[in-house]
Image: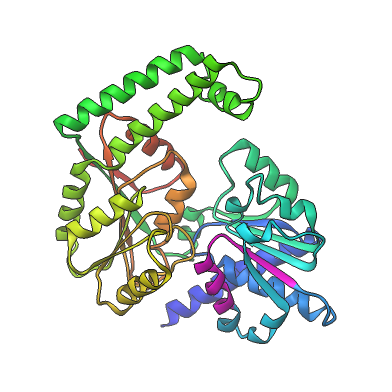
């Protein structure tokens, strides 16, 4: 108990450091800290500080990416004794807030801000005003365009990587086990076919095929029919090749083995498509539930309830649980679908690292050996520690 109190004090200390750094930057800036740092509490305290120093006509806005986080952030205000402020706070999703025009807020807090930087969602910042802006995410966006936008909008004022949070004891330590799997004969044929198409269209597009294809698609009105065809077929080949490795049948077998290796443990499973998420769920146990965007709100709520109550040991998700989902009792994760980006990896690992005494998170990553997926994995784990590659 004494150790846990010490950890809470340490986390509180770093959250206050983040707030002080934001104040020193004239209340405009980004807090970039690993999952488990407690960024939501930093947002709550920033709003509370702002509204307590303003008159009753001033309002706050909290922007979040999903309706689940919308409700969760409201609960955060209640959790930290600030429920009385909710009448003065709008909590909106990015997909509705960008439609606002000529609104003014004393403070805007952007949670998971990397998801609110698309050209459409940026309209909120162009069409409305605010006195204070606090942006929060686990790591800077990897896309150069989005990174530059965030730096211009709200420069980083405080940052801690996931591993720095681990070293400080703010979150539980972890181990990542990269486990190779193979495609079956039919999947190998499909992958080879799509990979050959990818190479063909890459050669036609030139040295920077991806950049050329992006530029063509962004300027369709002036691009030639040949260029548009090359760009379209190039991206179709990428998607088709990725679909083969995303849904490799060996991943189902691999997940079943991991479940057997980790009996009596709550497990989070991630894939890249809702269909495959359901397939994984069906394959592992009748005590598994699936949670993704194709499920109704009631189905998602029931799935979380079963998992939290212990009626289900395994919850399978696509992207819906990447952020804002706390599972203190779960210590095992399985990633069955990859991209080259490190942010989804950090978010998924972070789901398992909420601090508990003696807890160590274990994350299995199933990847297709000698495929593009292996290259994505090597990119996604750059900077993370405790990576173990199985043969």
Q: Is residue 2 left or right of residue 124?
A: left
Q: Is residue 152 left or right of residue 312?
A: right
Q: How many numbered marks appear? A: 0
Residue 54 x, y percent position in the rendering: 83, 78
- Residue 239 position by quadrant: top left
Residue occupying the point 66% across, 51% down: 121
- Residue 390 position by quadrant: top left
Q: In this rendering, does residue 154 appear at all?
A: no
Q: Quadrant of the N terminus?
A: bottom left
Q: Which region is colored magenta?
A: 60-76
Residue 27 x, y percent position in the rendering: 78, 62
Q: Is residue 366 above or below residue 202?
A: below
Residue 304 x, y percent position in the rendering: 36, 72
Q: Nearer the viewer, residue 76 or 96?
A: 96
Residue occupying the point 75% across, 54% down: 125
Q: Is residue 268 left or right of residue 63?
A: left
Q: Nearer the viewer, residue 64 or 135?
A: 64
Residue 48 x, y percent position in the rendering: 71, 77
Residue occupying the point 49% across, 48% down: 343
């Amino acid at each position: 108990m004494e150790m846990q109190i010490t950890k809470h004090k340490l986390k509180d200390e770093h959250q206050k450091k983040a707030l002080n750094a934001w104040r020193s930057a004239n209340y405009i800036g980004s807090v970039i800290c690993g999952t488990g740092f407690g960024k939501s509490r930093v947002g709550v305290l920033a709003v509370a500080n702002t509204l307590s120093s303003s008159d009753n006509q001033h309002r706050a806005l909290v922007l979040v990416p999903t309706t689940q986080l919308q409700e969760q952030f409201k609960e955060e205000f209640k959790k930290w004794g600030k429920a009385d402020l909710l009448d003065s706070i709008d909590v909106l999703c990015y997909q509705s807030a960008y439609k606002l025009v000529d609104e003014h807020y004393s403070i805007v807090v952007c949670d998971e801000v990397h998801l609110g930087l698309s050209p459409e969602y940026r309209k909120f910042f162009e069409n409305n005003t605010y006195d204070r802006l606090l942006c929060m995410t686990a790591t800077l966006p990897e896309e150069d365009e989005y990174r530059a936008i965030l730096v211009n909008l709200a420069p980083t004022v405080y940052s801690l990587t996931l591993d720095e949070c681990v070293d400080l004891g703010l979150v539980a330590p972890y181990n990542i086990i990269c486990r190779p799997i193979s495609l079956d004969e039919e999947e190998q044929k499909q992958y080879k076919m799509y990979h050959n198409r990818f190479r063909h269209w890459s050669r036609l597009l030139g040295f920077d095929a991806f950049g050329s294809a992006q530029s063509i698609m962004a300027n369709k009105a002036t691009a030639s029919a040949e260029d548009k065809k090359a760009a379209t077929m190039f991206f179709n080949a990428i998607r088709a090749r990725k679909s083969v490795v995303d849904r490799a049948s060996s991943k189902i077998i691999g997940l079943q083995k991991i479940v057997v290796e980790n009996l009596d443990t709550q497990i989070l499973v991630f894939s890249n498509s809702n269909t495959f998420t359901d397939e994984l769920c069906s394959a592992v146990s009748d005590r598994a539930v699936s949670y993704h965007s194709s499920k109704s709100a009631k189905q998602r709520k029931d799935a979380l309830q079963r998992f939290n109550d212990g009626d289900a040991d395994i919850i399978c998700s696509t992207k819906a649980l990447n952020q804002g989902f706390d599972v203190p009792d779960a210590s095992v994760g399985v990633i069955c679908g990859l991209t080259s980006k490190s942010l989804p990896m950090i978010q998924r690992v972070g789901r398992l690292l909420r601090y508990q005494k003696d807890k160590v998170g274990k994350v299995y990553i199933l990847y297709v050996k000698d495929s593009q997926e292996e290259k994505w994995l090597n990119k996604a784990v750059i900077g993370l520690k405790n990576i173990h590659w199985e043969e």
